[in-house]
Image (tube, rainbow, N blue to C red):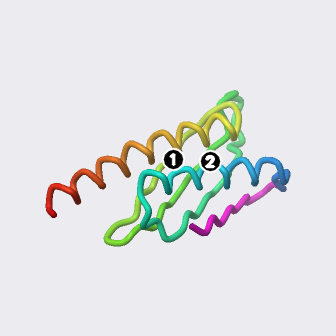
Amino acid sequence: MKVNVQTPNFAAKDELLVFVGKKLSKLEQFYDKIVFADVFLKVQKTSEKENKIVEVLLSIPGDDLMVKKEAKTFEEATDEVVKTLERQLKKRKQKQKAYL
């Protein structure tokens, strides 16, 4: 799976980009037909501490999955996104098995 990380308005450290890539690559254990993942890391200009946003668009045959989470850190938000995508991919796989 190809992971494309975009960070509008700030420069992300390499460690963060590697972290995001590793987390997302784990999704392939649950669904092997993922084409690519577009990741957007954004910082909201607010007084809130939870101002880090991670958006992931997962391209899979038939449908794309989009998940957006906010947290205090990008790592935290990435974990949340991956958990949500994992659930959605497992559901999708079960549905496909039901049709076979």
Q: Which residues are magenta?
A: 1-10
Residue receiving disc 1: 68
Identity of the residue drawn at 67% across and 51% down:
22
User: Which kind of residue does numbered mark 1 sit on?
Assistant: Lys
| Residue 73: % across, % down | 71, 35
Residue at the spot x=16%, y=63% of the render? 100
Report whether 97 appears left or right of 51.
Answer: left
Q: Secondary structure at mark 1?
A: strand
Q: CA distance from mark 1 to mark 2?
A: 15 Å
Q: Residue 56: image x %, image y %?
A: 54, 55
Residue marked by disc 2 = 23
- Which corner quadrant holds the N terminus? bottom right
Amino acid at the residue labelled 2:
Lys
Above or below, 69 relative to 97: above
Residue 5 position in % (x across, y down): 68, 61
**Which residue appears farthest toward the left when viewing the image?**
99
Is the residue under label 2 in contact with that under label 1 (CB below 8 Å)? no
Of residue 77 and residue 100, the one placed in the foreground of this image is: 100
Q: Secondary structure at mark 2?
A: helix
